[in-house]
Amino acid sequence: MAWLHAHRQELKTTYAELHALAEASWQEYRTTHYVSEVLDELGIPYERFAAHTGLVARWKGGAGSAPDDREQGSVIALRTDIDALWQQVDGISRANHSCGHDAHMTMVLYALKALQAVGFQPAGELRVLFQPAEEVGEGALRLLEAGCLDDVGYLLGIHVRPAKELAYGQVSSAIYHGACAVLEGKVSGVQAHAARPDDGLNVIEVMADIIKAVCAVSKDYSDVPASCKVTRLHVPNESSNIIPDFGIFTIDIRAQTNETMDALLPELEAAIHLAGKENGSPVELQLKSRMVAARPDPYLEAVAQEVITELLGEDAWARAPVTPGGEDFHFYRLHKPELHATMIGLGCGLLPGLHHPQMQFDLDALEIGAALLALSVIRMSPAL
């Protein structure tokens, strides 16, 4: 904590530089290059990928890095997301770090710097996943496919939280994200002169019925909780006097548990197809993305709670927020059930909220987050 406090201005400078490098999912080239330069300065080896923009650092220490130990899942790993959102900011469409990934990278990098400064050496290997494409729910799966989680026994992440969930100075040892999915649909109709609407099939009217069907399904699940809603409509019709024959729509789906999502998705798809059929219009549906809900890990949550109270006092620890937001971090434990994994929730005075184009938070929280990650690595190490 003392070392990080003495270097707090450097943390803020790094954050500002990463914030300015904002890049959308799978486009994080400058960001990955920036991270690689910092790791070069630290003397920590890393692996980059020809197929995508991720980066995995491997800080190896003593005997624990031997093959037999790796087979026992002895590797400790930190994970940070590196992509930004693409959104309207002051009337301009651009990549924008409004979900805190720039902060997460900063905290992970300075956790490594702080560990080096106090003379820490991994008992085996400390691996750091700089994961791309979290916002589209694809990055974690690609790192899993590449074997980046092989031998990992403990995985820790961190995420800044809105003030409505955690006040500044409050920290949770987990975040219970919900499951989420995105459905994309295509609707086909028949063109006609707008003066003779009965000669055609208006896809706008079909999509209006689809919206009603989606709202009805969402209402049925409102007590679970879960929701589904149409978030995008597009009809490529440039003429006002033509009945449009093609349209696309997007539906955002949320559920607090994977089981609820498993029940909700087929019911929703059936309702959409029925609405199209009743209008005589076929509907094509495609599941564009899906993220799974968090699975609590009592062991690693307990370790994180001990670190939080040791650094900040007992009053700082807060119960894990239950949020309908999604996070592809939870794919790691879904595909590796034996993995101990949790994500620390950091209260930082974040307003007005995540994904808001003007999202801001108290930058003094950066040193707190970095210290929590660094001490968590130390506390996990003896367990190996």
Image (spheres, rainbow, N blue to C red):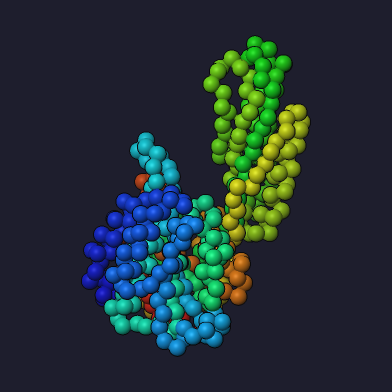
**Residue drawn where x is 61% and y is 66% of the image:** 334
**Residue 211's spot in the image, x, y percent?**
64, 35
**With 93 as the anchor, is 285 left or right in this view?**
right
Q: Can see residue 180?
A: yes
Considering only vertical position in the picture, is 365 above or below 269? below
> Could you tell me which quadrant the N terminus lies in?
bottom left
Considering only vertical position in the picture, is 212 above or below 228? above
**Is residue 252 or residue 349 the one in the foreground?**
252
- Residue that lies at the very extreme toward the top in this rendered image: 195
- Residue that lies at the very extreme toward the front in this rendered image: 50
- Residue that lies at the very extreme toward the bottom in this rendered image: 63
Considering only vertical position in the picture, is 288 above or below 102? above
**Residue 230's spot in the image, x, y percent?**
59, 39
**Residue 110's spot in the image, x, y percent?**
32, 69
**With 324 as the anchor, is 372 left or right in this view?**
left
Q: Report which quarter residue 89 is drawn in.
A: top left
Q: Report which quarter residue 71 is drawn in.
A: bottom right
**Residue drawn where x is 41% and y is 87% of the image:** 62
Q: Report which quarter residue 162 is drawn in.
A: bottom left
**With 23 as the anchor, is 223 left or right in this view?**
right
**With 211 as the anchor, is 158 left or right in this view?**
left
**Is residue 162 or residue 130 the one in the foreground?**
130
**Residue drawn where x is 60% and y is 53% of the image:** 290
**Is residue 374 or residue 363 the one in the foreground?**
374
**Residue 205's spot in the image, x, y percent?**
66, 26
